[in-house]
């Protein structure tokens, strides 16, 4: 079965961004409101720059949807850059550069500026900055929001939490309590995360994160952090151990690492696993006669064993480095003069970790939707649902083989 593919285009201060997503089966109802909601979520978050007051991201659908339903053709969407009006001469697609054009000639350490301009032989670093910019992630969130709606049809749910900003760590994040939390309490925790300006369920920790961002702002500095994405109800059997490029954990790692500034991706306990004996961390397997399901009491593996989803919640943590645009810039070199120079900027994000959480959700959704289509796909949503029920049906036991834990984690939608 073929899966889902997606591309984005557009420059940060160009006319706008384009997203294309292909492979979504026909007949899926798309809520336009949910797409716009995801775009709003990405723009929120304490520590963003003045630019976020200018942009009012809104996806305009160009193709692939008719009367609110997918029709099986490529879905194309457009997001206008409101800041374009201030850049229309400097970023014009045709014509000559304006007489007063100021080239960018000082690369920022930590950004794509130097390596990118040497690679493409650009003498104006703006040609690099514009596409390397994290502005691209608005289009990614929009195509990811389409993928999310396919997942939701099959009852897969994705949420995220910021678990670290700078030195402030949230030591008791929601994912660590998933084995014991009730559906109600999980709902409350997710609501708290959504209300928090730093996307964290614990108010006291969130307040300390806000203080850390304020301190960074006063220093003219920036902060990174860590975000965890949780995917509930992913069926058993996505990905494969049979080839290097089919492993589910590897697919997540590539997609998440492609988000600007993400420098590490961990599944489940991740790098903490190195501190323990094997007997302490592998999730023992049990069988529940009553529910006729396998179950685990722990989920250190983060829902993936041998590159295959095992029916437990999928847990992925991404680490974001501090943003390289600094109000108190670091030393650099003018690429024309080859003389020492610092690059000053009028505005910058201090911390975009809360936004990264939403972008990571979208990236995880795109991988899961692709895998779901590869395993169960069909041309129409009805065909895909039949395939899914057929594959997950355990003939020996006469049950739908789904997930191992409490009822709220179960089942396909009717
Ligand atoms: C970015 C720099 C800033 C951010 C931008 C990403 O933009 P500007 O250079 O216009 O001040 O605000 O992020 C977005 C525009 C966005 O929508 O997230 C960078 O250099 O990566």
Image (cartoon, rainbow, N blue to C red):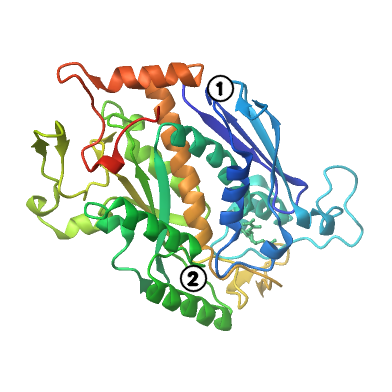
How dense is the environment of label 1, judged by Cα within 10 Å: few (below 14), some, or many (20 and up)? some
Which sits earlier in the primary sequence, circle 1 or circle 2?
1
Residue 49, percent from left and from top: 64, 68
Q: Quadrant of the N terminus?
A: top left
Location of residue 156 by image quarter: top left
Mark 2, other Cα within 10 Å: few <14 / some 14–19 / many ≥20: many
Occupied quadrant, residue 217: bottom right
Q: Under tag 1, what secondary structure?
A: loop
Reply above or below: 351 against 362.
below
Instruction: Specify whether 387 is left or right of 10.
Output: left
Q: Which residue is mark 1?
A: 27
Q: Is residue 65 left or right of residue 405?
A: right
- Residue at horizontal 78%, vertical 60%? 103
Depth-wise, is mark 1 or mark 2 nearer the camera?
1
Residue nearer the viewer, 366 or 326: 366
Q: Disc 1, ligand 1: is the CB inside 8 Å?
A: no
Q: Residue 61 placed where, x, y %?
A: 69, 35
Q: Quadrant of ligand 1?
A: bottom right
Which residue carries the number 2 mark? 223
Q: Position of residue 148 (x, y in %)?
A: 49, 39
Quarter of image, res 108: bottom right
Q: Which mark is residue 375?
A: none
- The mark tally for this picture is 2
Q: Secondary structure at mark 2?
A: loop
Does 382 appear above or below 299? Answer: above
Would you say residue 370 is visible in this rendering? yes
Q: Nearer the viewer, residue 332 or 269?
A: 269
Q: Position of residue 9 (x, y in %)?
A: 66, 40
User: From what the image shows, is residue 45 above or below residue 390?
Assistant: below
């Amino acid at each position: 079965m073929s899966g889902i593919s997606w591309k984005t285009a557009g420059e940060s201060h160009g006319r706008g961004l384009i997203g294309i997503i292909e492979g979504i089966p026909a007949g899926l109802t798309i809520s336009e409101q949910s797409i716009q909601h995801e775009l709003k979520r990405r723009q929120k978050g304490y520590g963003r720059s003045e630019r976020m007051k200018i942009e009012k991201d809104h996806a305009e659908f160009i193709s692939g949807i008719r009367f609110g339903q997918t029709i099986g053709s490529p879905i194309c969407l457009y997001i206008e850059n409101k800041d374009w009006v201030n850049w229309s001469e400097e970023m014009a697609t045709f014509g000559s550069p304006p007489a007063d054009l100021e080239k960018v000639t000082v690369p920022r350490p930590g950004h794509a500026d130097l390596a990118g301009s040497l690679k493409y032989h650009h003498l104006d670093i703006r040609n690099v900055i514009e596409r390397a910019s994290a502005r691209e992630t608005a289009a990614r969130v929009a195509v990811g929001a389409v993928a999310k709606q396919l997942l939701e049809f099959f009852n897969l749910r994705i949420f995220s939490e910021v678990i670290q900003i700078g030195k402030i760590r949230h030591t008791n994040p929601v994912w660590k309590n998933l084995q014991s939390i009730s559906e109600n309490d999980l709902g409350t925790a997710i609501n708290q995360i959504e209300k928090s300006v730093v996307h964290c369920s614990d108010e006291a920790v969130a307040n300390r994160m806000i203080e850390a961002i304020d301190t960074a702002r006063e220093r003219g500095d920036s902060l990174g952090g860590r975000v965890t994405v949780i995917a509930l109800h992913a069926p058993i059997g996505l990905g494969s151990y049979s080839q290097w490029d089919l492993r589910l954990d590897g697919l997540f790692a590539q997609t998440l690492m492609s988000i600007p500034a993400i420098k590490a991706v961990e599944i489940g306990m991740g790098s903490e696993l190195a501190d323990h004996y094997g007997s302490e961390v592998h999730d023992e397997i049990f069988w529940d006669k009553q529910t006729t399901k396998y179950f685990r009491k722990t989920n250190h593996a983060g829902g993936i064993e041998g590159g295959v989803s095992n029916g437990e919640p999928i847990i992925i943590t991404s680490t974001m480095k501090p943003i390289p645009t600094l109000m108190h810039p670091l030393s650099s070199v003018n690429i024309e003069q080859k003389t020492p120079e610092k690059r000053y900027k009028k505005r910058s994000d201090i911390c975009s970790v809360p936004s990264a959480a939403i972008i990571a959700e979208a990236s995880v959704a795109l991988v899961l939707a692709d895998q779901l289509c590869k395993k169960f796909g069909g041309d129409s949503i009805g065909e895909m649902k039949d395939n899914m029920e057929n594959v997950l049906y355990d003939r020996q036991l006469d049950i739908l083989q789904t997930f191992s834990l409490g009822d709220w984690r179960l089942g396909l939608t009717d």
